[in-house]
Amino acid sequence: MDNFLLQIILALLIIFTASTIQGITSFGFSLVALPLLGMLLPLKVVVPVLILFSLLLNCTILYHIRKSINLKQILILTIAGIISTPFGAYILMAAEESTLKIVIGVIIVISALLNLYGFRVKVKNEKVAFFPVGIMSGLLNGSVSLGGPPVVLFLSNQDVDKQRFRANLTTYFLILNVVTIPTYFFSGLITSEVLRYSSYLLPGLIIGTFTGITLGNRVNESLFKKLTLTLILAMGILSIASGL
């Protein structure tokens, strides 16, 4: 089989799996896809592709849970994320790929372990805490498409209602996607190669997203989340190893 064709088939399977997980749990798309796709393609291609796909993915998921959005609750978080995202894009352009892979792996491993072991720090003043969380998330989103871990950990520690948690999280990521894509475009990160791979992998995203949404109410979410986090932990370790 032609190497390029094999590469596309593997990438399609990765995107399908990652978007199915995202459709079921509202998290995990980049955590699963980034380290695996990073072994097939350069990160300067992978990260913009995932940002473009995240926009489509979040639009689709948000449509189904739009009635639970509370934008006021995440306003400060969103503003902070918007401010720091362009700085993250600069990091993606300037940093060595091996360094980025190690950073990606460390973030993924820490995020998976904290989620698996139910790490909780109750914050009384959400408005004050939202700003640094948003700054960190925006930097990670712009640089390596991993803006999720700081926000997921913070919101899950605040006893937010499950449906509102999903809606607010998806809204936040959607807004960040809208900001990140023009930033990438003007920075020269949205290239013809990025658009070409996006078109090749789009079917995996579409099928995986609707598979995840369909399965969302039929699976044991708690068990599935633990299995997903275990998989993500392995992906993080793999990413660190590939960057060494």
Image (tube, grey):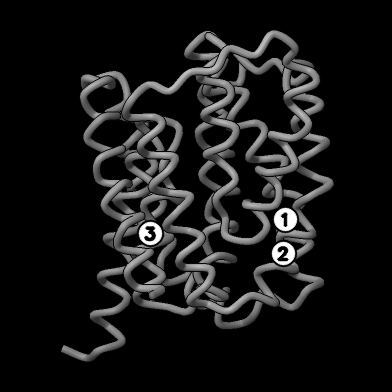
The residue lying toward the viewer, choosing from 83 and 201, is: 83
Determine whether, in the image, residue 88 is placed left or right of residue 220.
Answer: right
**Three-letter amino acid code at the position of disc 1:** Thr
Instruction: Kindly give the residue lying farthest to the left in the view shown.
Output: 1
| Residue at the disc numbered 1 | 180
Mark nearer the viewer, 3 or 2 = 2
Mark 3 vs 1, N-terminal side: 1
Q: Residue at x 46, y 68 (%)?
A: 101
Mark nearer the viewer, 2 or 1 = 2
**Three-letter amino acid code at the position of disc 2:** Ala
User: Where does residue 224 sit, x and y in percent of width and height?
Assistant: 24, 29
Is disc 2 placed on a helix, strand or loop? helix
User: Where does residue 193 sit, x and y in percent of width and height?
Assistant: 55, 82
Res. 124 image quadrant: top right
Is disc 1 placed on a helix, strand or loop? helix
Q: Residue at x 50, y 69 (%)?
A: 46
Determine whether, in the image, residue 241 is placed left or right of residue 188.
Answer: left
User: Where does residue 118 sit, x and y in percent of width and height?
Assistant: 38, 21
Marks 2 and 1 sit apart, C-alpha to C-alpha, by 8 Å
| Residue at the disc numbered 3 | 203
Q: 36 above or below 108?
A: below
**Three-letter amino acid code at the position of disc 3:** Pro
Is disc 3 placed on a helix, strand or loop? helix
Verify CB contact (< 8 Å) between mark 2 and mark 1: yes
The quarter of the rendered structure image containing the N terminus is bottom left
Q: Residues within 10 Å of mark 2 (few under 14, many from 20)?
A: many
Verify CB contact (< 8 Å) between mark 3 and mark 1: no
Q: 199 above or below 54?
A: below
Res. 127 image quadrant: top right
| Residue at the disc numbered 2 | 89
Mark 2 vs 1, N-terminal side: 2
